[in-house]
Each structure stands twice: as structure tokens, then as C-alpha cells.
């Protein structure tokens, strides 16, 4: 069965408003006709509305947010709810990114609440998982990924899970220039799909898109995307440059 192919650009805490608009316009100019791949732009919060205006009429472009709050709304100074994100056009939100785990001490209980809020607002979660270098070197990577998945997915029905995108991002590859080999990525993606089969069923496992993230770039994207269980990429650094991001999209 054919799964949704996705290339998502996570800009993290980068760019000014004017740079954001220019970057999006350059991306649209290059890839607007290539509509077999869903392109998700994930800028910082203040640029969401402006980016949405640029992409909303374009072929297979979507808007994503880097985070949302666990609560529906109210007195949470400095935070952004899923309903606010929906109101500016977001259809996707990152949850469980390793930087949220590491720097903001977010845990499974937070991810569950955030995903519930996202789903209530018709926003699809891009749920990120992945092991540290220590966990891989001590041969615990399969165990860690299993726990990261099962501790959160146990709270979601098959209907809810059908809205998920998964992103395997080995922490040792994020922003380091060191990419998982295609063989390592394929091995873990196939393993993740098996876990989904165990937790739900083989139909839903065959349908879920699993993205690879971690120093994905124009040089390695094609080999990664050739893997049968790799359905696209979650791109950090290389998404900040229009030519690099578009080359990655064209790697399918
Ligand atoms: P990177 O980041 O491509 O810069 O390694 C990926 C991510 O954090 O999603």
C-alpha cells in the first residue's frame, strides 16, 4: 500500500520574519509542482500566520508547529494551545522531539496530553522518538524506542493513532552531521512498524508514515528514502536553506 510521503522542515529557533517569508517563497518556486510529497513547514510560532498565507493555496504544502501546550487554554503565560495553532492554519505539531525531552524535561505524560489536545483540534501529531549514543552503544536502542512508543501509544485508540506521523530521530544524529546509515534507519523503521503491529494491527502499521530525522541532507536523502520503511524526513539544519531543502524533497 502506498503511504503518505512527507518532507518536514523544522526550523527550530531560527530566522527573522522577512527571512522566513523569503525562504518559503524560494521553496514554493522550486517544488510547487512536485505534489506527490507532502511538504510541511514548521517555523517558529510568530511566523506561522505569515507562512500560512504563503503556502495555503499551494500544492500539498502544510503548516506545522514545533510545540503545543498540554492544556486547552487559560492562564499559562508564554504558552500556545493547540486551538490557537489551529486558528492560524496548523495541521501538524511536533511532540516528543529530543530537544523538548532534553532541555525542557518533557516526559511521556506531557506527550500524551499534548497529543490529546492536538487531536481534539484536528491537528496531526508528529511523534518523535529515538535513542541517545549511550543507549545505542550499550545495545539498548530497540528497548528504548519500544518504551518510548508503547508508553504513549497505550493511551490512544486505533482511530486516534491513524492520525499520527512517527519520526525516528536518533539523538546522536541530530545536528551533529552524523547520519544513521540507510541500513540502520531501515532496521529501526521496520522494527517500529512491527511494534505498531503488536500494539494495534498490521493494517494500521502498513499505513503509518515513519520519517527519519538526524542530519538528513541532499547527499544522503536519496539513499535513506529508498528504504522501504522510510517514508520521508524531518529536516532541521538543511531545511533552513531553500536549495538544500528542495533537493531533499526531490530525492524521492
Ligand atoms: P537536523 O535536525 O536535521 O539538524 O539534524 C533534525 C531534527 O531535529 O528534527
Image (spheres, helix red, strand yellow):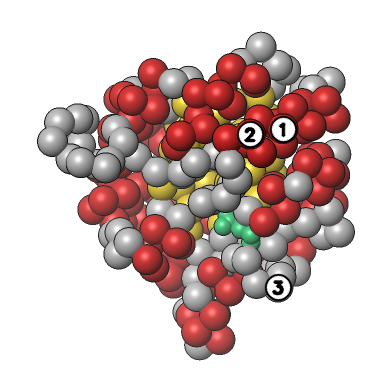
Answer whether labels 1 and 3 touch (C-beta < 8 Å): no
Q: CA distance from mark 1 to mark 3?
A: 29 Å
Question: Which comes sooner in the sequence, label 2 or label 3?
Answer: 2
Q: Residue 203: which quarter of the image?
A: top right
Q: Say how many tags the image has.
A: 3
Answer whether labels 2 and 1 touch (C-beta < 8 Å): yes
Q: Which numbered mark, 2 or 3, is in the foreground of this view?
A: 2
Specify few, some or many for label 2: CA neighbours under 10 Å numbering under 14, 14-19, or 20 or more.
few
Specify few, some or many for label 3: CA neighbours under 10 Å numbering under 14, 14-19, or 20 or more.
few
Which residue is at 85% across, 39% downward?
A: 250
The residue where tag 1 is placed is: 22
The residue where tag 2 is placed is: 18
Label 2 CB, ligand 1: below 8 Å? no
Question: Which comes sooner in the sequence, label 1 or label 3?
Answer: 1
Residue 245's spot in the image, x, y percent? 76, 44
Quarter holding ligand 1: bottom right
Q: Is residue 179 left or right of residue 108?
A: right
Q: Residue 156: which quarter of the image?
A: top left
Q: Residue 16: which quarter of the image?
A: top right
Residue 73 appears in the figure? yes
Label 1 CB, ligand 1: below 8 Å? no
Q: CA distance from mark 2 to mark 1?
A: 6 Å
Is label 3 in a helix, a strand or a loop?
Answer: loop
Residue 197 appears in the figure? no
Q: Which mark is residue 178?
A: 3
Which residue is at 58% across, 74% downward?
A: 172
Amino acid at each position: 500500500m502506498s503511504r503518505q510521503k512527507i518532507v518536514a522542515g523544522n526550523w527550530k529557533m531560527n530566522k527573522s520574519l522577512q527571512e522566513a517569508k523569503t525562504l518559503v517563497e524560494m521553496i514554493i518556486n522550486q517544488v510547487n509542482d512536485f505534489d506527490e510529497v507532502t511538504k510541511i513547514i514548521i517555523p517558529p510560532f510568530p511566523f506561522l500566520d505569515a507562512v500560512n498565507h504563503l503556502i495555503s493555496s499551494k500544492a500539498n504544502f502544510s503548516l506545522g508547529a514545533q510545540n503545543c501546550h498540554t492544556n486547552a487554554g487559560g492562564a499559562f503565560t508564554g504558552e500556545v494551545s493547540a486551538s490557537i495553532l489551529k486558528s492560524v492554519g496548523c495541521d501538524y505539531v511536533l511532540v516528543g522531539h529530543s530537544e523538548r525531552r532534553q532541555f525542557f524535561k518533557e516526559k511521556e505524560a506531557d506527550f500524551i496530553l499534548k497529543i490529546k489536545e492536538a487531536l481534539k483540534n484536528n491537528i496531526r501529531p508528529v511523534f518523535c522518538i529515538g535513542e541517545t549514543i549511550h543507549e545505542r552503544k550499550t545495545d539498548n536502542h530497540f528497548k528504548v524506542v519500544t518504551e518510548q512508543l508503547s508508553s504513549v501509544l497505550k493511551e490512544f485508540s486505533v482511530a486516534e493513532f491513524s492520525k499520527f506521523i512517527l519520526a525516528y530521530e536518533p539523538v546522536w544524529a541530530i545536528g551533529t552531521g552524523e547520519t544513521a546509515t540507510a541500513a540502520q534507519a531501515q532496521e529501526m523503521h521496520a522494527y517500529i512498524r512491527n511494534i505498531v503491529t503488536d500494539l494495534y494491527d498490521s493494517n494500521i502499521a502498513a499505513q503509518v508514515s515513519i520519517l527519519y530525522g538526524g542530519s538528513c541532507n541532499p547527499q544522503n536523502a536519496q539513499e535513506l528514502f529508498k528504504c522501504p520503511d522510510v517514508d520521508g524526513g524531518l529536516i532541521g539544519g538543511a531545511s533552513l536553506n531553500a536549495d538544500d531543502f528542495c533537493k531533499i524533497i526531490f530525492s524521492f
